[in-house]
Image (cartoon, grey):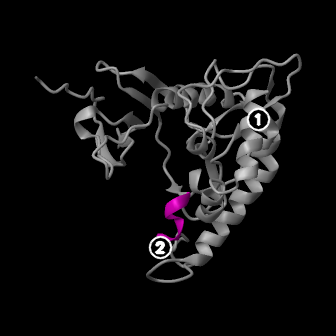
Amino acid sequence: MAVATRSIKQGEKEVYSTALRIYSWTPTTFIKREVPPERRQKNLCGECIVDPFVKELFQIEASALKLLSQTKIKVPKLMDSGPDENGLAFIEMELWAGIPGSRVKEECRMPDGGKHIDTGECTLCEEKAWANAESYLTNVVLPELAKLRSKTMGLDGKVVPPPWVRYHDNRPSWVPKVSDTDRYVFCNWDIGAHNMMFQYGTLEVIGVYDWENAGYYPPEFQFVNRSRHEFDAQFEDIPKVRHLIALLDT
């Protein structure tokens, strides 16, 4: 049986991939794609590693970018999204020229004449970027998200809870709840400096990307991801997970 050919944008070049996503660039855009069947990795049991919510997550991000473009939060411009000709999910957005938060400390990012160090990792640059990120979160992102409210849970009819909820409750789908009041707030449970882009030379925040993990939920779902340790700890906080599940079912 012939293997389906992945739909490629003009000038698209794959940059890196994970078990669940393929990331690529064109000269002006950034693209995320669902991993096709022929490239799926297998776990220790020999089963293909898949994300059963990947299509919903890409659709959520597309909807979130459209919504947030009307706020003070700087987000990438959505260029295209949907299933490609093979039915695989993808999302394409504008490509920012800057430094991803996860790579800031790889070297000193200050201009010549003002560098902290000549070679190696620069913790001072990381500290500066993280301080700028914290200020942007406190003064722009969180206040703007708090203004966005809805009577319906999720986003555009799709509910995909945080991974720590899905880890403990693997139901195949979640039903959006509807309230008499706009008690649901726009949340993102993977927001932090690692998902921000920073300017060369100043390390000021350009904007925030990666909005798969978002939607209208009770305010308890809002989570600022400041470290991998804090993120991983959410999976072990059983009382919190149970509370979040109860909120989803209420």
Amino acid under disc 1? Ala
Amino acid under disc 2? Glu
Question: Does residue 133 appear left or right of residue 218 in this picture?
Answer: left
User: Pointer 1: what residue?
Assistant: 246
Dividing the image into 4 quarters, which one contains the C terminus? Answer: top right
**In the foreground, 174 or 30:** 174
Q: Position of residue 249 (x, y in %)?
A: 74, 28
Q: Position of residue 231 (x, y in %)?
A: 62, 57
Which residue appears at 49% of the width and 77% of the height? 121
Magenta-span inclusion, residue 213: no
The local secondary structure at tag 1 comes to helix
Question: Does residue 152 appear left or right of residue 155 in this picture?
Answer: right
Over which residues does the magenta segment extend? 101-106
Q: How many marks can you see?
A: 2
Q: Position of residue 248 (x, y in %)?
A: 73, 31
Q: Residues within 10 Å of mark 1 (few under 14, many from 20)?
A: few
Quarter of the figure with residue 28: top left
User: Pointer 2: what residue?
Assistant: 107
Which residue appears at 74% of the width and 40% of the height? 244
Earlier sequence position, callout 2 versus callout 1:
2
